[in-house]
Image (tube, rainbow, N blue to C red):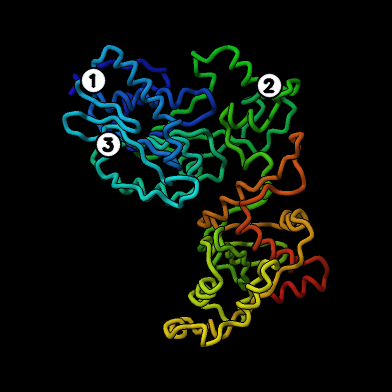
Amino acid sequence: MIASGVEIECLKQFRILHELPEDTNLVILIGGRGGMKSYECSKFIAKSATIENKRCAILRDEQSKIKNSILNEIYLRYDTANQYGHLDPYFEKQENSIKDKKTRKEVVFTMGFKASSNANTAGLKSVSDVDIAVIEEAEDIRDVYKFNAFSDGIRKPGYLIIIVLNTPDLQHWITKRYFHAEKITYADVPELSGHNIDGYFKLIPRDRPGFVCIQTSYKDNPHLPESKVIEYENYGKQTDTTFDLHYYLTAIKGFASSGRRGQIHTNVKPISFIDYMALPYKEIYGQDFGTASPAGTVGVKNHGNTSYCREINYLPLHVKELAKLYCRLKFTDKDKIIADNAEKETIAKLRGGWNRQELDGDEISFYPGLLKGFFIEPCLPKTTLSSGISVMKSMNLYAVTESVNLWNEINNRIWAIDKNGNPTDEPEPGHDHLLDPWMYINQKYKPQTAQNIQDFAGIFS
């Protein structure tokens, strides 16, 4: 093992990373572009692995992307320290890891929450023997349960998790869990005086045991070329051709926004699952279909011009599997389902049910509802998506906080851009497997006249 006591040079903001308070188990490095988060973290990992002989795991949402991330930075720091071959007797640098020659254990290795963009999970190997885990670009990890399952698996005494990310939006679980949000003022961005800066927030770290936060931006980077500084600051100048207010405030300045640029559904508020289930309104169900993409199922409770929604299913399902889901949910002939009208044959099958000859004995015993069929009907004929979205935007909307995939769609559904870079009145494809069935219900039953209000109340009473 290499002797310890080596002094590491770093920016003053990152000195605490090398002098962490006792019992620190989580460090978050957050902010805008150019803040040296990955650079300083890579130095810390290279030192921890080679000098302190700690096992360090490098993670991203997709493992296939790790090679082009902080791992490359770690290798650069390693190569700098090893320019005279001092590390060669002790370590072997491999394509995706650094191995201790004596113990044959990897002191730096990579993992992913997903193997690729087409995979649901990567089947994470055991992390119980990890000393330090670095999660890079954590803003891409929208599912808090992935993080919980991973962090709960680290059991080594004195472990440390480092989260590295650009500032996410306000709905991200990292923002909610570890920060307070405070609206920015023109005092924070005097160069934008007169511009609309509503919807942007500075993040204040919460006081949590074992938690250390380091926030930086390009202003903290003394090594950034002047040309790059000018490029960054031009995004905030309306007179420049690259002016982009949202990008400047989020990616450059590191403020949190209430949503993505061009985000469509900005009027949705959170409600807990417990509070949703306690609402005294009848639940009606929306259904999208998909055997390769998600067959999105939602539950919706409406009252007046307010609509509440929860996610029920996000898995791809063939028609019979979908019917079995309805059976498990104990749907009766009084539970109305509004479905995508493009799937007329699927709707007819779900409504009419299956003949006994089409089912085996177990299916008949465990899923008797397959013989009866379900109360399902098509949504209104589609004209344009924008008309349905207009209905949604005119209502007071609430989504269940625990509905992770629903919130992911809310936060990521944006207006498509034309060839000139201007937003259109149609959304980008995708992020609609749950939002569309929610929309089907509100399109069909939105109260517009006194008679409609009476009918609307009857459906949900």
Q: Residue at point 58% right, 82% down? A: 353
**Element assignment for label 2:** helix
Cα–Cα gap, marks 3 and 2 = 44 Å
Q: What amino acid does circle 2 point to? A: Glu
Location of mark 3 (residue): 131
The quarter of the image holding the N terminus is: top left
Q: What amino acid does circle 3 point to? A: Asp
Q: Of callouts 1 and 3, which one flags the residue occurring earlier in the amino acid sequence? A: 1
Q: Of callouts 2 and 1, which one flags the residue occurring earlier in the amino acid sequence? A: 1
The quarter of the image holding the C terminus is: bottom right
The circle drawn on residue 88 is 1
Q: Quadrant of residue 282?
A: bottom right
Which of discs 3 and 2 lies nearer the camera? The answer is 3
Cα–Cα gap, marks 1 and 3 = 23 Å
Cα–Cα gap, marks 2 and 1 = 51 Å
Mark 3 near mark 2, Cβ–Cβ under 8 Å? no
Observer-nearest residue: 288 or 334?
A: 288
Q: What amino acid does circle 1 point to? A: Asp
Across and down, in percent, residue 203 comes to 53, 35
Across and down, in percent, residue 152 comes to 33, 48
Location of mark 2 (residue): 191
